[in-house]
C-alpha cells in the first residue's frame, strides 16, 4: 500500500432554474448530482500526473505551469488551470474516473477542477467558497470560457436532498429541500458544441453592456428593460430580469410542494433561453417540447451553457424511461484510504 493515499470525489450538477444568470450576479438553483469524478492517488513528486480512464494520454503538469491553455492533451488544461491557480508546492500522482457524461452540460469540467483542487489540498476542511472561485478562474484559464460561479459552487457546496439557491452577487448559498416524490431526469439532446467556440462569451458581453446601461441587472425593472433601444440588449436584459423572478417563484412553489407550478416555470425558463438569451437549438427545443408533452412531466429546460447538451425535466416518479434520474447530492469529499 502506498502511504497517504486519498480518494477525492467531486459531483457534477444540474441547474434546475436560473439559466445564464450567474455571470450577471443573479439567482441560480443548481443541485449537485450523484454522478461525479473520482481521483485516487497520493501527494508527492514535482508534478501532477493523472491517468484518466476516458483519455488515451495522461495529464502531466509541472508545478510551475504558466500557460494552462497551451497544455496537451486538451483535458489536461483543466488540471493545469487548477495547478496554476493553487500553485501547490507538492505534486500528485493518481488516476481519474468519472460517471458524468463528458461535455453534455453536467459540469464534467468543474467536477474535474474541484477533484484536482481537493487532491492537491489533500483535506476537505478548506474554505470551499474560496476554492470554488479558484476553480472558476482555472476554468477561465484552461478553456477561455468566461463561465460564472455556479458549477464550481454546486460541486463544492452541494447538500444532500437539496438544491442550492446561490445569490451570485453576494455568493450566499441557501439550501432548498426538494420534495421526495418527484424525479429529476436529465436527457441528452445528443448535440455537442464546445462553449468556447460559440456565443457564451458574446452572451456574457451583451449582458454586461445591458448592465452598463441599466445598472446591476438583477435589480433592474422590467419597464426599464423594455425601454432599452438596442433590441439585442433588451432581450438579454429581459431574460435576466424575468429569470430572476422565475427562480424566486420556483423556490416558493417547491417550498409548497407545488411541482406543477415549479415545472411550468422551468419550461418558461427554457422559452426565455430560446427567445431572449438565444442559447438553445432546434434539437434542444424539440426535446423540451416532447418531454413536456409527456403525461406526468411537469416541466423541462436546458440545463447547461447551451447550444447542445442536456435538458433537465421534473416529473412524477418513474414516468420517464430515458436519460439519467439524478439525486441531489452532497458536495465534494476527500477520504484518506
Ligand atoms: C455554463 C457555465 C455556468 C453558467 C451556465 C449557464 O455551465 O459554466 O457558469 O453560466 O453555463 O447557466
Image (spheres, rainbow, N blue to C red):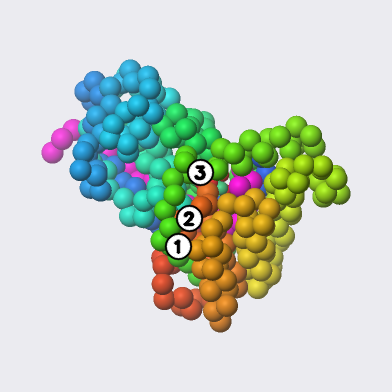
Q: Name the residue under label 2.
A: 308
The kind of secondary structure element at disc 3 is: loop
Instruction: Kindly check if marks 3 and 1 are in contact, taking CB atoms under 8 A apart as contact.
Output: no
Front position in the image: 63 or 252: 63
Q: Is residue 33 magenta?
A: no
**Ligand 1 falls in quadrant:** top right
Front position in the image: 135 or 177: 135
Against 69, is 280 above or below?
A: below
Give coordinates of residue 104: x percent, y percent: 42, 54
* Mark earlier in primary sequence (1, 2): 1
| Magenta-tinted stretch | 1-22
* Mark earlier in primary sequence (3, 2): 3
Determine the image quadrant of residue 321. bottom left
Q: Is residue 323 in view from this perspective?
A: yes
The kind of secondary structure element at disc 2 is: loop
Q: Mark 1 points at which residue?
A: 189
Question: Mark 3 against mark 2, which lies toward the viewer?
Answer: 3
Q: Mark 3 points at which residue?
A: 198
Against 36, is 74 above or below?
A: above
Q: In which quarter of the image is the N terminus?
A: top left
* Mark earlier in primary sequence (3, 1): 1
In-image side of 9 versus 337 (left or right): right
Instruction: Kindly check if marks 1 and 2 are in contact, taking CB atoms under 8 A apart as contact.
Output: yes
- Gap in Å between the C-alphas at discs 3 and 2? 11 Å
Q: Does the magenta stretch include residue 8?
A: yes
- Gap in Å between the C-alphas at discs 1 and 2? 6 Å
- Gap in Å between the C-alphas at discs 3 and 1? 17 Å
Amino acid at each position: 500500500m502506498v502511504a497517504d493515499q486519498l480518494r477525492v470525489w467531486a459531483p457534477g450538477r444540474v441547474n434546475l432554474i436560473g439559466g445564464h444568470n450567474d455571470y450577471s450576479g443573479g439567482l441560480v438553483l443548481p443541485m449537485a448530482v450523484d454522478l461525479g469524478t473520482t481521483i485516487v492517488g497520493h501527494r508527492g513528486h514535482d508534478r501532477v500526473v493523472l491517468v484518466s480512464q476516458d483519455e488515451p494520454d495522461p495529464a502531466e503538469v509541472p508545478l510551475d505551469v504558466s500557460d494552462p491553455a497551451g497544455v496537451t492533451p486538451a483535458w489536461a488544461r483543466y488540471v493545469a488551470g487548477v495547478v496554476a491557480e493553487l500553485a501547490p508546492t507538492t505534486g500528485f500522482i493518481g488516476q481519474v474516473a468519472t460517471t458524468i457524461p463528458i461535455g453534455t452540460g453536467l459540469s464534467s469540467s468543474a467536477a474535474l477542477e474541484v477533484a484536482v483542487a481537493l487532491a492537491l489540498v489533500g483535506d476537505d476542511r478548506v474554505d470551499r467558497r474560496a476554492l470554488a472561485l479558484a476553480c472558476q478562474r482555472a476554468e477561465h484559464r484552461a478553456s477561455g470560457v468566461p463561465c460564472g460561479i455556479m458549477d464550481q459552487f454546486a460541486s463544492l457546496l452541494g447538500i444532500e436532498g437539496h438544491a442550492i439557491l446561490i445569490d451570485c452577487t453576494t455568493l450566499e448559498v441557501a439550501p432548498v429541500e426538494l420534495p421526495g416524490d418527484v424525479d429529476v431526469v436529465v436527457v441528452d439532446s445528443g448535440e455537442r458544441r464546445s462553449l468556447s467556440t460559440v456565443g457564451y462569451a458574446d452572451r456574457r458581453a451583451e449582458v454586461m453592456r445591458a448592465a452598463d446601461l441599466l445598472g446591476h441587472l438583477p435589480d433592474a425593472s422590467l419597464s426599464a428593460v423594455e425601454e432599452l433601444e438596442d433590441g439585442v440588449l433588451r432581450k438579454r436584459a429581459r431574460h435576466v430580469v424575468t429569470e430572476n423572478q422565475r427562480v424566486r417563484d420556483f423556490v416558493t412553489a417547491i417550498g409548497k410542494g407545488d411541482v406543477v407550478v415549479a415545472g411550468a416555470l422551468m419550461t418558461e425558463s427554457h422559452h426565455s433561453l430560446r427567445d431572449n438569451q438565444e442559447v438553445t437549438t432546434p434539437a434542444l427545443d424539440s426535446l423540451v417540447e416532447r418531454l413536456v408533452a409527456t403525461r406526468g412531466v411537469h416541466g423541462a429546460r436546458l440545463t447547461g451553457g447551451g447550444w447542445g447538451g442536456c435538458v433537465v425535466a421534473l416529473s412524477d416518479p418513474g414516468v420517464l424511461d430515458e436519460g439519467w434520474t439524478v439525486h441531489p447530492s452532497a458536495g465534494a469529499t476527500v477520504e484518506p484510504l
